[in-house]
Amino acid sequence: MIMDNHSHTWIPNTLNVISNIPFLFVGLAGLILCHYKNYFRLCSQGELWSWTLFFAGITAVGVGSSYYHLKPDDATLVWDRLPMTIAFTSIVAIFIIERVDERAGTKSLAPLVFAGALSILYWSFFDDLRPYAVVQFVPCIVIPVMAIVIPPMYTHSSYWLWAAAFYLLAKVEEAADKPIYRWTHQIVSGHTVKHLCAAMVPVFLTLMLAKRTIEPDRVSLLQMWKVSWVSMRERRSSNGNTVNVGYDYAAVSTTSEQ
C-alpha cells in the first residue's frame, strides 16, 4: 500500500501527486533541447529519436503518474507504468547506438519500445507482472555494467552511474514506504521521496548531454579505474621505498700519535 494520507484543497494524495512535477519539467526541457539547434550535439538520427522518446516518456511519467495517484486503481496504473517502459527501452537502444553499433541500436528502438508496451498489455490482461519486471530491471543491471565495461563514444560517462545510483536509491525508498512514513511522523512517505529521487535520473542524463563531447580515446571507465589504481599503487610504493640518508660525524684528531 502506498502511504499518503494528505489531501490539500481538491488534490487527493497530494504529495504523491505533486512529487511527479519534476518529471514533467525535466522531460519537457529535454524534448526542447533535443530539437533546438541540436543543443545536445547528437551525431545521428538514431540518437535523436531515441533521446526524444526517452524525454517523451519522462514527460508522460509526470502526467501519467500524477493521474494514477489522483485515483489509484488498475485502470489508471496503466498510464503510470506505460511511460516508464518507453523511457527504459529507449535508454537500452541509446546504449546500443553509442557503445555497440549505431545501425543495430537504431533498428532496435522500435522493437524495444513495442516489447515494453506489450509487457503492460500482458499485465493488464493476465495480471502477470513478470514481463514488465524484466523490462524495468534488466536495464537497471545491464546499463551500469555497459557504462563501466564498454568504451564510450562520448565523455562524462560517470553521469550514467550517478543516474543508476539514484534509481537504485529510489527503489530502496519505495520498498521502505511505510517505515519512512513513520520516521517522518506521517509527513512524507517513501513513495513520495522515491518520485523525487527517480526524477534525478533524467536530471543527470540531461546534464550529461549538455556537457559531453566526442571521446577521442574511447577508454572505458573500467580501464580508467585500472590505470588510476595502478598509478596510485606505484606512487605509494615509491613513497614507501624512499630512503632517508643520515650522516654521522665523528671528531678526528689531526695530531699524530707519538
Image (cartoon, rainbow, N blue to C red):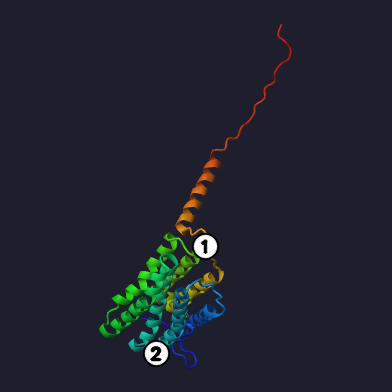
Q: Which amino acid does label 2 sit on?
A: Lys
Q: What residue type is labelled 1?
A: Glu
Q: Which residue is drawn at 31% across and 83% down?
A: 121
Q: In terms of sequence position, does the residue under pointer 1 or pointer 2 come before the other?
A: 2
The circle on residue 5 is: none
Count neighbours of disc 1 (C-alpha within 10 A) and say few if under 14, some if 14 to 19, many if 20 or more: some
Q: In which quarter of the image is residue 4?
A: bottom left
Quadrant location of the N terminus in the rendered image: bottom left
| Element under disc 2 | loop
User: Which of 22/60 is in front?
Assistant: 60
Give the residue at mark 1.
215
Question: Looking at the image, is 163 positioned above or below residue 114?
Answer: above
Left or right of residue 241, residue 86 in this image: left
Quadrant location of the C terminus in the rendered image: top right
Give the residue at mark 2.
71
User: Which of 63/4 is in front?
Assistant: 63
